[in-house]
Amino acid sequence: MNLLAAIRPDSWNLPLFLHVLSAMILVGGTLTGASALALARGDERMLRLGYWSLLIVGLPAWFLMYGGATWIYSMEGLDEVPIDSAWTAIGFVVAEAGGLLFLVSLVTGGIGVRRLRDGRGTALLKLTMVISLVLLAAYVVAVWAMTAKPG
């Protein structure tokens, strides 16, 4: 017999919805920021737009995504047992290491935006763009892991 659908309690709907929605917003904010930084070609307004979209959209979305993930994880009772599935391990590695990388990109980008006043700082914003592109690749892997559920 094949399993056609998994039934979950209704109490899991809100944290799961919060996790998925904020993950989509995080990917969208990161894509917008990286795209603006990549297409700026030295234009200060585009460089600032790229950085501020990462800061204003991406950072709150990361906190909500991580909060929703840990909320649903604890509601399922999985926080009391060792991680035994590949998809949860991938999710936590991408979320935690990605959060650290995201903060590094925001710090370097913030310094870069501040230096734009003096006509410098584009190199730091390029670094922010590269880190954002690495994060986007990691987010694609995490989305695959959450949907395909390997291992």
Image: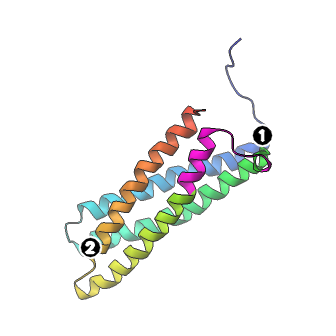
* Circle 2 residue: 123
Q: Name the quarter where the C terminus is drawn.
A: top right
* Circle 1 residue: 10
Q: Residues within 10 Å of mark 2 (few under 14, many from 20)?
A: few
Residue, x 75% and y 44% (percent of image)? Answer: 12
Secondary structure at badge 1 equals helix
Residue 63 as seen in the image, left or right of residue 25: right
Percent position of residue 124, x then y: 31, 74
Residue 83 as seen in the image, left or right of residue 43: right
Residue 37 is labelled as none
In the displayed orientation, state which residue is furthest to the top: 1
Question: Where 7 falls versus 48 (above or below)?
Answer: above
The amino acid marked with disc number 1 is: Asp
Viewer-closest of 66 and 47: 66
Residue, x 24% and y 82% (percent of image)? Answer: 120
Camera sees residue 46 = yes
Find out whether the residues at labels 2 and 1 contact each other: C-beta distance under 8 Å.
no
Main SS, magenta region, reads helix
Residue, x 38% and y 70% (percent of image)? Answer: 51
Viewer-closest of 99 and 48: 99
Residue, x 72% and y 48% (percent of image)? Answer: 73
Mark before the other along the chain sequence, 2 or 1? 1
Viewer-closest of 99 and 65: 99
Q: Which residues are magenta?
A: 80-95
Taking the magenta stretch, the answer to whether it contains residue 76 is no
Q: Name the quarter where the N terminus is drawn.
A: top right
The amino acid marked with disc number 2 is: Ala
Measure how far apart labels 2 and 1 are at the Cα level.
Answer: 49 Å
Secondary structure at badge 2 equals helix
